[in-house]
Image (cartoon, helix red, strand yellow):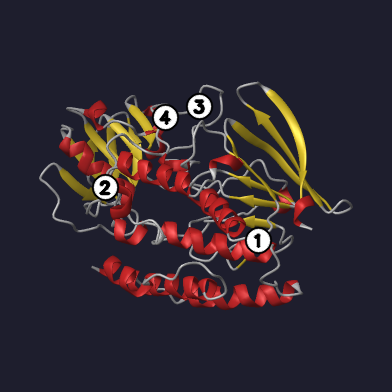
Amino acid sequence: MYSSTRIAICGAGPSGLSQLHAFESARQSGSQIPEIVCFEKQNDLGGQWNYTWRTGFDEYSEPVHSSMYHNLWTNLPKECSEYVDYPFDEHFGQPFPSFPPRSIFYDYIRSYAGKNNVRQYIQFNTVVQWISYSENKQKFHVQIKDLKKDKVRSEEFDYVIIATGHFSTPNIPYVDGIETFHGRILHSHDFRFAQDFIDKHVLLIGNGFSAEDISLQLYKYGAKSVTLSYRTKPKDFKWPDKIKEVPLVIKIDNETVYFNDGSSETVHAIIFCTGYLYYFPFLDDNLRLKLSSNCFYPANLYKTIFWLNQPRLLYLGMQRMGLSFNIGNVLAWYARDVILGKIILPSTKDEMKSDIAEWQKKEKGIQNFTDYVNFQREIVLDLINATDYSRFDIHRMNQLLFE
């Protein structure tokens, strides 16, 4: 059966690598696995962690995928994000600080991929242009382009796994009067060097994780002042003197920005830290996941993985995740075992809908960070108990998140 079954994986970032590792692990354990092809439009694996100085478009006129900036450090302890089967201390041969810089984290990801022998499945500089499904053939039609050779071809697959992530298409809301602003405007996706803003008054619209870190980078590298505009409530951190929080922006007039508490500021640059859109333009409309915001349990995805209308289409890593790499592996192991026939999906769409509804009911009860972490733990335990993925102390990891 499996020798004729073909699987396309879109993306060789952390989720795609997890899926490749899951199948390679099964192969090394003696299982027969399908033919697997992973398409990656960048020149190397790593997804978001594959930093580039480019913004906007790459050398092939493809939208730049990575949102990494030069001096980014992780905001999640490595103890919560490292792979359970490949801890940081093993990789570096010695104890390592909890919050490594971007370059170190990327080195860790590349080494993990090498250790698990997954590069053999990846076609780099290859972008997926279109995916549709034929009910008659029971096959996915996948159109891809070799960017280096500038050649387009089509192939058929039995399964498609979307592992492209959802942090590369900027969400940029309109602000009244922004067209009158003569300074620099960008989204955090295109932020690379804090040194570009030395002696500038900078406004950050949004006060999430990216805004927090970028504001401190700007302060460290010499911005004259940093103003963070929040939509709902301030962080109320003990910010340095040059950083302050203000309410929502309501209007911009040249270099003057007005806020809904009646205050105003003169700024030289505006950075939107307003999140990202779920965007899958390469998928036929009836296959496309459509979400308006980052969520904990996506609608229409059974076990957060299987597309309700066609379970041979799988999405990985589309929910908010705090234990990202291990959750990615847990999802990938579960997906693999369904494809290999070790786990049987419900026989009807109604059964899958009912399961999704139960999880979304729990999601609606999330009121705070503690609820979110506990909800995430429930998802992991629900999936991991059905597979042979290495067990890890999720309770300890959750405690580290609380601390």
Disc 3 vs disc 1: which is toward the camera?
Answer: 1
Cβ–Cβ below 8 Å for labels 3 and 2? no
State which quadrant residue 203 falls in: top left
Disc 4 vs disc 2: which is toward the camera?
Answer: 2
* Three-letter code for the amino acid on which mark 3 is drawn: Phe
Residue at the disc numbered 3: 57
Question: Residue at 76% of width from left, 74% of height from top?
Answer: 348
The secondary element bearing badge 4 is classed as helix
Residue at the disc numbered 1: 31
* Three-letter code for the amino acid on which mark 1 is drawn: Ser
State which quadrant residue 343 falls in: bottom right
Q: Where is residue 185 in the image (x, y as percent from the top left)?
A: 37, 31
For residue 179, which numbered disc appears in the image?
4
Which is more N-terminal, label 1 or label 2? 1
Disc 2 vs disc 1: which is toward the camera?
Answer: 1
Camera-side residue: 327 or 166?
Answer: 327
Please state, as top left, top right, bottom left or bottom right, where the C terminus lies in the image.
Answer: bottom left
For residue 77, which numbered disc appears in the image?
none
Which is more N-terminal, label 2 or label 4? 2
The Cα–Cα distance between marks 4 and 3, rounded to whole angstroms, is 23 Å
Q: Position of residue 27 (x, y in %)?
A: 61, 56
The secondary element bearing badge 1 is classed as loop
The Cα–Cα distance between marks 2 and 1, rounded to whole angstroms, is 36 Å
In the image, is residue 361 above or below residue 227? below
* Three-letter code for the amino acid on which mark 4 is drawn: Glu
Which is more N-terminal, label 2 or label 3? 3
Residue at the disc numbered 2: 100
